[in-house]
Amino acid sequence: MIKKLKDICKFLSGYNWKSSKFSDEGIPIIRIGNLNTTHSNFKYWNDSYDKKYIIKHGDILVSLSGTIKVAKWIGKNALLNQRIVKITAKENINVDWVFYQIKYAIEQIEAKAKQATIKNVSINDLKKIEVEVPDLETQNKIVAVLDKASNLIEKRKGSIELLDDLIETQYFKIFGEPYENTKKWKTKPLNDIVKNIKTGWSIGGERRLKQDDEYGVLMVSAVTTGEFKPNEYKAIPKEKITRDIITVQKGDLLFSRANTLKYVAATCIVEEDYPKLFLPDKLWKIIVDKKQITPEYLKLTLSSVTFNENLSRSATGSSSSMLNISKRKLKETIIPVPPLEKQKELSTIYWKIRGMKSKKRKSLEYIETLFNSILQRAFNGQLNFDHNLELNSLLNKIDLEAKENDLSSIKNDDTYFQLLIDRLNNQKFETIDLYNKAKYAVFELLKTKEGIEQVYDTTSKKIKLASK
């Protein structure tokens, strides 16, 4: 049955808390920038308030200003700010089903708008969204399947973050705190250990996918997270390029010389060759003297918290808009210069961990694609609740590089266990990655003799798997 969201949900708009009464203590206020995190810069309220505006862990929120977003609140109790709506479900409606339904509705609208973002919707626009509402049992089944895929995405993201932490841990273990130079390495200004700082060229382009014969001028957002993002560019027809350009290659160290206070002085290392992406004037390519320093060591030094903060403070301009770091200021920066052998040791660790991260990112992309596929089918009425999808999710949890994996969810469920055997015998897997993980699971179970054995099939005249 098709219904509008207002028929199945209750809506609470946030309150306009007076900024003049914001405090540094009290209960946090959830503004749009805080929606998906518990670590953003909160403002606090230390005065009286209506308890109906209290948001608890797990509540569903939708932002109405900027880019529309739907999120589950993951923090502690907080207050709801204006232009954010709290959504609760009415009787016989699973609120998590509503969360996924709104997520799907937003994606559908954006797809029709050719990847444009939806901005500044009203609460009435939200209430008028029409959805196909199945019975509660079907809603619960849809949520169960989507939750499994969603949880797998979060776990994969967490494992990627741990790898980032591992690189930093290894850096500080070898070199100590760089700004204070706690291990007393000899120091030099960057001017003595950098061969060249190349400046890019800015030219107007379009924010769209480039054609094969086009180039892309990078935006500063390609660098700001500390990880190179090759899709952050503007497309440029080849004939418009009238001067030399600086393209990016694997191992290049890029530096954001102009940005807001939060992002100025960001650095990243490029991990592949991109012969048709080139630098704008706000991004520099730092070419080091490799007889003295490695790009990996310099990147991690400049991006360490204290170093980055001090570099940012050396920038000129308005802190509320665009700041700029001059080449002179950068070249005057004094950094520790440990023995080259130790730097190369770090570089080896850096690229090994980045390789592991690349594999996990590809796995994450696959899981996200799987999730989006399930989301589409769930709200198109095409989702069949067979166990293949659930088995895929369990297999995707397997990390082939880990020393061991928890296979209890497969071996303790007769349905999953038999399905794994049947699919391996018939080699029915959507990707080679899933196939490899299935083989891993079976080999581990064979080693421990966990209810599985190899038998000779007289019909096919092949060795097959069978449950004991």
Image (cartoon, rainbow, N blue to C red):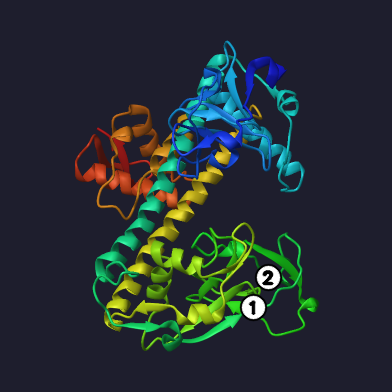
Tell me the number on the disc at residue 217: 2
Q: Is mark 2 on a helix, strand or loop?
A: strand
Position of 117 with respect to 248 (left or right) is right
Label 2 Cα neighbours within 10 Å, binned few <14 / some 14-19 / many ≥20: many
Give the residue displayed 44% in from the left and 31% down from the top: 26
How many numbered badges does the structure rendering display?
2
Furthest residue toward right: 239
Q: Which of marks 2 and 1 is nearer the N terminus?
A: 1
Which picture quadrant has residue 355? bottom left
Q: Is residue 145 visible?
A: yes
Please state, as top left, top right, bottom left or bottom right, where the N terminus lies in the image: top right
Which residue is at the front of the view, 245 or 282? 282
Decide: is 378 above or below 136: below
Residue flagged by tag 1: what amino acid is it?
Gly
State the separation of the CA atoms marked 2 and 1: 9 Å
Q: Is residue 378 visible?
A: no
Give the residue displayed 42% in from the left and 49% down from the top: 435
Give the residue displayed 52% in from the left and 18% down from the top: 51
Decide: is 444 above or below 361: above
Q: Position of residue 270 (x, y in %)?
A: 51, 71
Give the residue displayed 20% in from the left and 39% down from the top: 449
Position of 13 with respect to 170 (left or right) is right
Which residue is at the front of the view, 317 or 148? 317
Residue flagged by tag 2: what amino acid is it?
Val
Callout 2 touching callout 1 (CB < 8 Å): yes
Q: Name the residue under label 1.
A: 200
